[in-house]
Amino acid sequence: MPEALAPAELRSLDRAHVWHPYGPMPGRQEPLVVESASGVRLRLAEPAHGQQELVDGMSSWWSAVHGYNHPVLNEAARGQLDRMSHVMFGGLTHEPAVRLATRLVEITPEPLRHVFLADSGSVSVEVAVKMCLQYWRSAGRPAKQRLLTWRGGYHGDTWQPMSVCDPEGGMHELWSGVLPRQIFADEPPAGFDAEPDAAYARHLRELIAEHADRLAAVIVEPVVQGAGGMRFHSPAYLRVLREACDAHDVLLVFDEIATGFGRTGKLFAAGHTGISPDVMCVGKALTGGYLTMAATLCTSRVAEGISRGDVPVLAHGPTFMGNPLASAVACASIDLLLGQDWEREVRRIGTGLREGLAPAAKLPGVRDVRVLGAIGVVQLDHEVDMAAATRAAVREGVWLRPFRDLVYTMPPYVTGDDDVARICRAVCAAAREG
Ligand SMILES: *Cc1c(COP(=O)(O)O)cnc(C)c1O
């Protein structure tokens, strides 16, 4: 091991050379230096606002559902490391990837049968789009190449995903004239339990019917829109999309990269709807937050459609496709999840969030407080002061990453009741001070 960098030196090198997500160069904010992580706690290299350890309220952006440094996942990684960390996937295959793909087919909605292992969520969305466009090309309908989505979504940061992110106020507004032009429905009316709005359902149906000749697919985040605004909507609208897509020869893609693996209270958010998509993306919690990996699943209809075309192959093949290390950890993470009463844990955390976040509703500047599954959201009536809100949370011993008008949390499923309560106190403090 090289000698450890002193935190101050590390921060200065970081500022000079290292891009951070959605960050300027050189960096303007002082990132906290994490030295290690275990359970639900991040250990800082030096104390910040009196705290050496922070309870992670973010699961490292939806991914670390089992917490950090988990003995079972460590063992899976170590075991695979001793066999091989990586081997190319062109012309070769291996047990971890085959096991993972088979497992994903077993646990996702019924007609999804084929798996493309991608190296990040955004790439899995690119692959989903490519599958849909290629399906219609193969079917002799190359004009079907546009996508429809509803506003308020987030699907990643590469080109096609950016084109279906919320076009206003989002991170990708800069590119509005450059991106492929897609078709946007209004934002789905808010509320998981809200009575479905017939006028909105009609709006979806009419828009799909109107553009059907040019539409390859509808792509949405089912039930929870994540980084586009942390909004929940009625599963009824997804059934409307399914019917309209079937009626007008349009494929339906569910982006479950954030919602997958139990976060909304069902293993996949599709489980709230009673319907299945033609193509589905998973990522984030796939490896329990250990390694970067995502997957695009499709039905046999889609796969066979592509195979009937003039170019009968799916022309995509990342260098690190099917990475054995990530596949082995993903298998272990799925087994770990399904081997416990995860529904109970998600419900328990949801109950804790509901109780602990209730006081936030009375704070000045708070517009809405909502909880679904193990996701808690406090929406402000103003842009959050990210530095002030983060500082307030850290003072409470919690790591949060508020954005736009949102202070939110999706804790690891192993978070104990006391730590859930602590996260809630931190969210309230961040909402008060941000
Ligand atoms: C995070 C996310 C993505 C992008 O995944 P990356 O791994 O960051 O590329 C896409 N869709 C949704 C719904 C996400 O939450």
Image: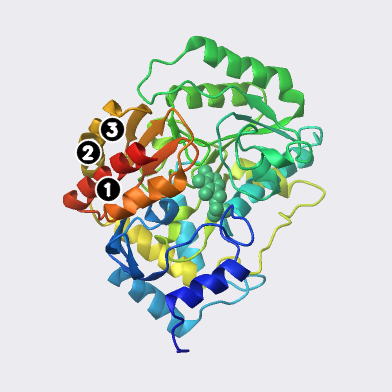
Mark 3, other Cα within 10 Å: few <14 / some 14–19 / many ≥20: many
| Secondary element at image label 3 | helix
Mark 1, other Cα within 10 Å: few <14 / some 14–19 / many ≥20: many
CB atoms of marks 2 and 1 within 8 Å: yes
Cα gap from disc 2 to disc 1, whole angstroms: 8 Å
| Secondary element at image label 1 | helix
Q: Residue at x 61, y 42 (%)?
A: 171
The quarter of the rendered structure image containing the C terminus is top left
Q: Residue at x 43, y 16 (%)?
A: 196
For this view, does 340 lie left or right of residue 407?
A: left
Is residue 115 shown to the viewer in this render? no
Give the residue type that dot 1 points to.
Ile
Give the residue type that dot 3 points to.
Ala
Question: Disc 3 or disc 1, which is closer to the eye?
Answer: 3
Which residue is identified by label 1? 423
Q: Residue at x 34, y 75 (%)?
A: 75
Residue 28 figure quarter: bottom right
Residue 77 image point, x, y percent: 40, 74
Give the residue type that dot 2 points to.
Gly
- The tag earlier along the polypeptide, 2 or 1, is 2
Is residue 178 shown to the viewer in this render? yes
Which residue is identified by label 2? 356
State whether label 2 is within 8 Å of ligand 1. no
Residue 190 image point, x, y percent: 44, 23
| Secondary element at image label 2 | helix
| In the foreground, 214 or 310 | 214
Q: Name the mark on residue 360.
A: 3
Residue 204 image point, x, y percent: 59, 19
